[in-house]
Amino acid sequence: MGTVPGVRRYAAGVLALVAATAGWRLTALPDTSAVETSADFSFHARSLGPPAQADDRVLRPVAPGYANLRSLVSALGAGVALFDVDGEVVADDLCLVDPRRDTVTVRPAPGTSRGYRPFTLVPPERRRHEAPTGCLPADLDQDGWEDLVVYYWGRSPSLFLRVPGAPPSGAAFRHRALTAEPEIWNTSAATAGDFDGDGRLDLVFGNYFPDGVRVLGGGTAGPGDRGDAVMPDSLSAAANGGGDRLYRATGPALFAEAKGVFDEVEGEGGGWTLALGTQDLDGDGRPELYVANDFGPDHLLVNESVPGRIRFTEARGTRHLTTPPSRVVGRDSFKGMGVAFTDLNADGRPDILVSNLTANHALQEGNFAFVSRPGGLHEGHAPYDDLGEELGLSRSGWSWDVKAADFDNDGTDEIMHATGFVKGEVDRWARLQEAASANDLFLSRPSLWPELRAGDDLSGRDTNTFFTRGPDGRYVDVARRAGVGGDNGDGEGGEGGEGGEGGEGGEGTVSRAFAVGDVDDDGRLDFAVANQWSASVLYSNHGPTAPFVGLRLRLPAGTCGTATATRPARTPEEQTRPEPAYPGQERLGHEQLRHEQPGHEPLGHEQPGEARGRVWPQPERPWQVYPGPTRPAIGAVATVRLPGGVTRGRQLYPANGHNGVSAPELLFGLGDDVPDSTVPVEISWRDACGGARTASVSLEPGWHRILLADGRASEIRWP
C-alpha cells in the first residue's frame, strides 16, 4: 500500500509528459524534403517602382486618438493588380498602391515591351487623412476597356473610367466618385461579381475601421469625421467595425447601394473586414461571398439573389467531436486576413483557404484549409472541414493575402501567403500579448492598447510562403529555395538558405498582397508582390514547365441588347471553298479539328517524359473571329477533362483576397497527362443580359483567347 501514494505522486507528471510529447508529434511540420519539392521552381525578381530612398516614410501621420498606435495603424495599405490597360487582352500592366508616398501607379510589367511611361491616378481634392489601400480593375461600363476602382482609408472609393482608345496616361482615365457625397470609409478589401445574375458586375467593399472614423492625418477634424477613435470591442467577436457594403450595377458605370443586404449577418454592428472572396460554391451560377474578418468570426454568405434583388443567407459549419470551435466555418475567432479558392481534394468543388496569424512563441491561431464535403449550402449548413494542420498549411507567420496557382503546370496548385506585420529593431510581441489577454471591455479604447511606435517590431522578419504539395499529400514551404521568400531586389531569385517562419536563413520583407498572371505570355505564371514600406517586386517564372491549356475568356463589349459578336472573317481564297474544306479550320463548339501545320508536330504527340522543361509554342490558327472590343468574362467557369478521365475546374474571379487582384485568365496545367490531340473544355457564363450560357470546345495545349457570344465559344485572332 505504501507504493500507491508514490504512483499517484508521479502520475500527473508522467501523463503531462506523454501529452506534451504526443502534442509535439501531432503538430510537427511535414518532413517531406524541401529540396525535393523545390526542384521545379526558378524565379527572377524585378523591382516595381523606385528603390528605397532616405526620405521614404515608414509610418503615416495618424489622427491624435491613435498616436500611441501609430505603428499598428500604419501597417496596411500596399496593394497590386494585374490588368490590360490598352485593350490587347494579355494582362501585362500593373496597378500598384505604394504606401511610401501614398501613390496609385499604373505601369507596364518589367520585361515587357510597352510604349508608355508609368503614371499616377489621383482623385480631386484628396485630403491629408486619405490614403489609397487598393486597386480593382473591372470593365464597369462594358465598353471593352478596363476601368479602375481605387479604394482608401479616409475616403469613399473612386471610379477611374478608361477613355476608349486613348494612349495610356493619367488623362486616359476620368474620375467619378462612387457615392453621391464624400464619405469617410476605411476600406481594406474589394471584389467584383454579378451577384444578382443581371449581366452586370456589382462591387463589394470590406471596411475595417467604422465609417466616419478618421484614422490617418494629423490636425483637426474634417467633414464627416465622427471625432472619436475606435478599436475593436473584442479580440474574438468584434462587431463595431466598418462592415461591408455592396453596390449593385444599375447601368454603365452606375451603381446604387444595396442597403441592408448584410444586416441579417452583421446586425447593427459591422465586422473588421480584411479580405473578400467571390466564388460559386454550389454550381448554381450565383457566386457566394466569403467575408474574412479580423477580431471575429468570418461569414460564408450563400447567394439567394434574383435579378435586381440581392440577398444572402449565412451558412455555418458543423463542429465535430475533435474540432475546436475556432476552426469551424462561421464560428471562428481568429484574425481572417486573406481568402482564396482551390480544389484540395479533387472533387470538382472549390475549397476555401483563409490566412490567419501564426507566430512562433506568440499567437498560434492557424490558417484554415476548409475542404468540401457532400452537402448543400442553402439550408444554412456549410459542408466544409478545416484540414489546414493535416495538410501542412496551418502555419505561415503573420499572414495577409493568400493565393493558389499552378506555377509548374503539373496540375496541382502551389499556395502562397504574404506575411509580416511591422518591421523594426525591438520585438514588441510581449506588449501585444498583454492586449491579447486583456478584458474585452477595455479593448475599444485606443489609449488602453500597448504603445507601438517607430522602431518596434511585430513579426517583421517573416518570409512569404510558397507551399508545394509533396508525394505524401502534405504541403511544404519551399519559398527560400525557390527564391521568393522576400528581400529579392533586382536579380535572380536564388536558392536562399534553410529556414521558414521567423526569417531564419535571411530576413523577410513585410508584404501584403499578390497578383498572379502570365505577364510575358510564355505559359508560365508569374506573380507580383505588394510590399509595405519597401519596393514591391515582380517574380518572373523561369522554371521548367509542362503542357497547359490557358483560357482568356472574353465577352463582346456592350450592354444588354448591344453586345454582339463580330462574324468570322474569311479571306477571298477561303470564300471560294466550301466550309469546312481547308486544313486547320476551327469552329469551336461545333467540331473538333487539330492544327496540322508544316514544321510543327502537334503538341499532343509529346511523350510524357519530354513534357516538362519546355516552353510550349503557341500554334497559329488560320480561321477565327476578328472581334471588336471585348471584356473579361468575369464569373465564367471552365472545366477541362484530361485523357485519364480527371476533370479540373476554375472560375474567373480575379479579385479575391486582401488587396491583390490577379490577371483575368485561367490556366490548367496538364503535367504528364499529355493529350493525343485536344482537350475537351466546357465553359459556362452569363451574357450581357444575364442569360446563362454553356458551350463545349476542344483545345490544343497553349493559350487561347475565346470569345463567348451568341451562345457559342470562338477563337479570337486579330489581323
Image: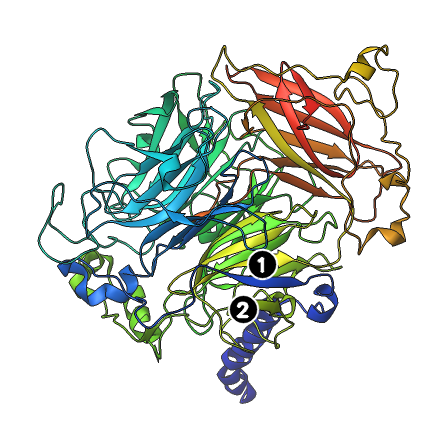
User: Which kind of residue does numbered mark 2 sit on?
Assistant: Asn
In the figure, is residue 72 to the left or right of 670?
Answer: left
Q: Position of residue 172 (x, y in %)?
A: 39, 36
Query: Mark 2: which secondary structure?
Result: loop
Q: Residue 510's image quarter?
A: bottom left
**Residue occupying the point 62% across, 47% down:** 518
Q: Position of residue 663 (x, y in %)?
A: 55, 42
Label 2 environment density (alpha carbons within 10 Å; few <14, some 14–19, many ≥20): many
Q: Which residue is mark 2?
A: 488
Report the disc number at residue 539: 1
Decide if residue 283 is in sight here: no
**Residue occupying the point 44% across, 59% down:** 49
In the figure, is residue 305 to the left or right of 227?
Answer: right
Q: Nearer the viewer, residue 584 or 398?
A: 584
In the figure, is residue 612 to the left or right of 379?
Answer: right
Image height of 110 relative to 676, above or below:
below
Image height of 377 relative to 309, above or below:
below
Tag 1–tag 2 contact (CB < 8 Å): yes
Quadrant of the frame with the N terminus: bottom right
Q: Residue 374's image quarter?
A: top right
Q: Nearer the viewer, residue 165 or 20?
A: 165
Q: Position of residue 325 (x, y in %)?
A: 45, 51
Report the disc number at residue 481: none
Q: Position of residue 76 (x, y in %)?
A: 34, 57
Query: Mark 1: which secondary structure?
Result: strand
Decide if residue 715 is in sight here: yes
User: Which kind of residue does numbered mark 1 sit on?
Assistant: Tyr
**Residue occupying the point 16% across, 54% down:** 229
